[in-house]
Amino acid sequence: GAVVSQHPSRVICKSGTSVKIECRSLDFQATTMFWYRQFPKQSLMLMATSNEGSKATYEQGVEKDKFLINHASLTLSTLTVTSAHPEDSSFYICSARSGPEIGELFFGEGSRLTVL
Amino acid sequence: DAKTTQPPSMDCAEGRAANLPCNHSTISGNEYVYWYRQIHSQGPQYIIHGLKNNETNEMASLIITEDRKSSTLILPHATLRDTAVYYCIVRVANRGSTLGRLYFGRGTQLTVWP
């Protein structure tokens, strides 16, 4: 199947710094990608929809100035956690569609952020 | 809001069938039932989906009750690698730009033991 890759897989940063996480579709183009967050022992929570060439659509309660999303090309979306704090420590997962069918939705491996 | 209810955990012996239930009593006529699983510290993986007919693929079978208020995911011969959290999701449409907007519930932690 299609492959979605995230980088970095793990990142540790100091409180107050910004961290960028990349989501790439390796063998297909994706006009839409999705970002999720998952706290330990909890379920995935949809954060936002990343749209190529336009602004991201954020879910209710997600701070768009805190979580900056850029989808500058058809194969890359980035999530920047700005001024990170320990409560932002989480597992961040992206997904992308290679086609219109549900079986054509693929998730990345996830990126674990730890803010000290 | 997740519109589904799943048991928090289940166990299954290796080689036996794992039957994972899901209640979705408020499902609408145009909503599909989707199943994903998430192995520890990995992204979710699509398993199967259905509307009202039973479905089978190389990974699993999906049995949907006639009233569509519940369904069961069946892994016919569970292996240790099937240990994961299994999510049952209901949502409208099988296509479209919002397809990736999935709302996950807590899922069922399936543990397959030797």
Image (cartoon, coloured by chain):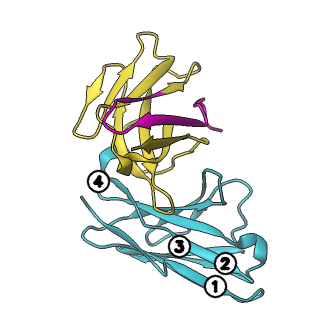
Chain colours: A cyan, B yellow
Residue that numbered label 4 is attached to? A99
Tags 1 and 2 in contact by the CB under 8 Å rule? yes
The first of marks 1 and 4 along the sequence is: 1
Q: For the point 52% across and 27% down, which residue is it?
A: B22
Residue that numbered label 1 is attached to? A12
Residue that numbered label 3 is attached to? A111
Q: Residue A7: x, y in percent?
A: 46, 80
- Circle 3 chain: A
Q: Tell me where residue A74 sits by quadrant.
A: bottom left
Distance from label 1 to label 2 (Cα)?
A: 5 Å
The first of marks 4 and 2 along the sequence is: 4
Q: Tell me where residue A84 sits by quadrant.
A: bottom right
Question: Is label 1 in a helix, a strand or a loop?
Answer: strand
Q: For the point 37% across and 25% down, which residue is it?
A: B51
The first of marks 1 and 2 along the sequence is: 1
Dot 3 amino acid type = Ser
Distance from label 1 to label 4 (Cα)?
A: 34 Å
Image disc number at residue A114? 2
